[in-house]
Amino acid sequence: MPTIDMKSRTDFRPMLRKAVMMFFLVLSAVVPALAQETPKSFMDDPINHPMAPLYLVTALLFITLILVIIVAIYMLRILNTFVEQAEKERAKKLGITYAPSVSWWTKFWDEFNAAVPVAKEQDIDTGHEYDGIRELDNHLPPWWKGILYGSMVWAVIYLFAYHVIGSLPLSGAEYENELATAAEQVRAYRATQPVTVIDENALTYSSDAAILSNGQKVFISNNCQQCHRQDGGGNAIGPNLTDTYWIHGGSIKNIFQTIKNGVVEKGMPAWGKVMSPTDVRDVAFYVMSLQGSNPKEAKAPQGTLYAPETPTAPADSTMGGK
Ligand code: HEC
């Protein structure tokens, strides 16, 4: 029996193939760019992130591509129906039987499921019938078996790789590795930062403007003023820092150490734990610079009179908090 030559049909497959190829080409160009690490997490501040424009463009590109593919598939289907219709009519005119071509997708789907066609159900009928419901002896679909065998093979690979040879790290080791990597990153970062070692025994006060202005900034931003007043005159909590009487000594070294180690039991925090040594030095210099500023309604003197002429032992012996 003669059939219609199916080659005469418009073939849209090359077009679709091109579209899919384009999609993967763009994907392969974009993925390495996305994988590039940026120091700050994107989620912290998506709008100001340096990669934000690229991400946005990529997202738009993806959406457009997906839309184009969906529309293309729909157009193809509509065109196919028209072509089929035309072929049917032509076959009718020529008086031949119309035999639709089987698409690769139908072939694939049939193989994928390997379901017994309804016409051949008798072959697998078990003969069990209840109220018109018949039991068929269907085998498991190939896709299902594929998953089963695939996971069995994977289980063996996994067992060998993770437990027998140990070539891949288990979750615990993976976690340790990440911690080690992070520690290494911290170490590397610290190495790039200038290290300022402040020798507290060799401190000499200077009225360096840069140091004092940073010291003032530290004094205000670390809430020193809450306990010592904005002008250092002292309040109900902290002592007056502008007079010549000191509880813990008035030398620059004493002041530095009091700020660094604090007098925790008396309510003076240990700032060395939260501040850089430079900041501690700068604020100590700033406190020193407040000497004799005589603010109004300053707190009454506490401690002992500090005489700068004898800046050694006596002051140190009164060091508290140790
Ligand atoms: C939570 C309150 C509080 C804050 C904040 C605070 N201090 Fe104090 N500070 C105190 C108290 C209380 C004392 C007295 C400790 C004592 O009696 O031994 C003190 C003592 C001191 C002394 C020694 C005074 C002396 O007479 O020997 C210095 C210097 C000082 N503070 C500087 C600072 C600086 C600089 C800051 C900010 C970085 C700061 N303090 C923040 C409560 C505070």
Image (cartoon, rainbow, N blue to C red):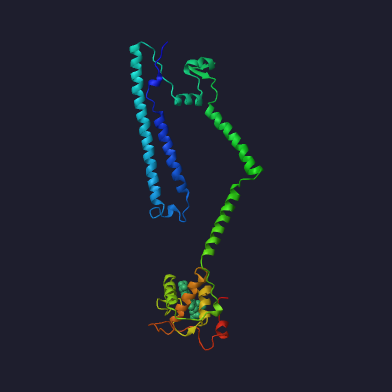
Q: In the image, 252: left or right of 58? A: right
- Which residue extends farthest right? 164
Q: Residue at x 56, y 53 (%)?
A: 178
Q: In the image, 70: left or right of 35? A: left
On the image, the x and y values in percent for residue 213 come to 42, 75
Q: Where does the C terminus fall, quadrant-wise?
A: bottom right
On the image, the x and y values in percent for residue 311 come to 54, 85
Q: In the image, 261: left or right of 9? A: right
| Image quadrant in which you'd find residue 217 | bottom left
Q: Residue at x 39, y 44 (%)?
A: 59
Q: Residue at x 64, y 40 (%)?
A: 160
Q: How many marks?
A: 0
The relative height of residue 26 versus residue 77 in the rendered view (above or below) is below
On the image, the x and y values in percent for residue 39 come to 47, 56
Question: Which is more toward the observer, 166 or 91?
Answer: 91
Q: Where does the N terminus fall, quadrant-wise?
A: top left
- Which residue extends farthest bottom? 309
Q: Is residue 268 visible?
A: no
On the image, the x and y values in percent for residue 6 come to 40, 19
The relative height of residue 242 versus residue 55 in the rendered view (above or below) is below
The relative height of residue 94 versus residue 315 in the rendered view (above or below) is above
Q: Is residue 61 visible?
A: yes
The relative height of residue 9 versus residue 270 in the rendered view (above or below) is above
